[in-house]
Amino acid sequence: MIKLEKLNRNEAVRYLGGSGIALNYRMDRLMDECEKEIIEKSSPKYLYVERDLPFEELMQGEDIKNHLDGCEKAIVMCATLGAEIDKIIRINQISDMAKAVVLDSFASVAIEQVCAKFDELIAEKYEGYFQTFRFSPGYGDYPIELQKSVLSMLDAPRKIGLATNENSLLTPTKSVTAVMGLSKTPIDRKKRGCAVCNMRDRCKFRRNGEHCGF
């Protein structure tokens, strides 16, 4: 189980389009309120399965083939904050649009933090493997329609209530599906995620809620 205790405010401000600006007292209070509400209402859950490669069901499009090139295993995962987050954002879109926008930004931060924690759990479990970053349906030429196959593979609708609509969009919306590669040999730097970077504990980008681009 992954528990959220604090959300990255700098990253939430970046989602709002205000990176680097100073917040006034009113906005600071609103940020406090929204962060607390997202943490209290979130119910983070994740699922994953391991698949030996090549696994044809996953290999649709050239981008995922390139991403998994040289990997022996794939981790197919999904994560969600739960339906309550969609509900509180939707309610506030009717009553207080400014708050709804801030709630949405913190929810985006929250699901990314859940996924980052998941990355770390996989790095610990598969010690000795080199790990790629998460590659999601909809990236590049990786078909977004694969969302349904991924969720079916994970039995996500039944286990954690995560499904897709007719447009292959996830419901609840603050959710993620992705594929990660595992290799016994070093992988290209551009494919690596933060969880397996030897600079992660002293990285100036991570301290500021950013990343180096690799």
Image: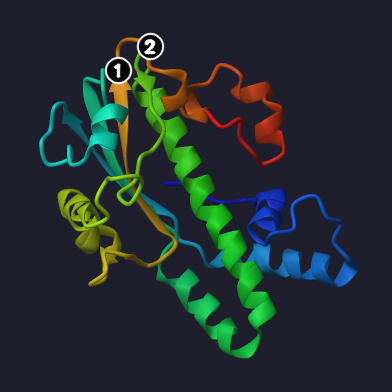
Q: Is residue 4 left or right of residue 189?
A: right
Q: Are marks 1 and 2 in contact (CB under 8 Å)?
A: yes
Q: Is residue 24 left or right of residue 145?
A: right
Q: Nearer the viewer, residue 149 or 124?
A: 149
x 46%, y 19%: residue: 189
Asked if residue 59 can be seen in this view, the reply is yes
Q: Nearer the viewer, residue 187 or 2?
A: 187
Q: Pointer 2: what residue? A: 186
Hey, which quadrant is residue 184 in on the image? top left
Above/below status of 196 relative to 150: above
x 30%, y 23%: residue: 182
Above/below status of 203 relative to 95: above
Under circle 1, the secondary element is strand
The number of callouts visible is: 2
- Please rate how many residues cluster around mark 2, counting C-alpha atoms within 10 Å: few if below 14, some from 14 to 19, many from 20: few
x 54%, y 84%: residue: 91
Q: Pointer 1: what residue? A: 183
Distance between the Cα atoms at labels 1 and 2? Answer: 7 Å
**Disc 1 residue type (three-letter):** Ser
Q: Nearer the viewer, residue 101 or 142?
A: 142
User: Can you give x and y, in whole percent of width and height, for residue 150 in the image?
Assistant: 21, 50
Above/below status of 126 relative to 31: above
Residue at the top extreme of this rendering: 185
Asked if residue 39 can be seen in this view, the reply is no
Under circle 2, the secondary element is loop
x 30%, y 44%: residue: 77
Q: Is residue 84 left or right of residue 180?
A: right
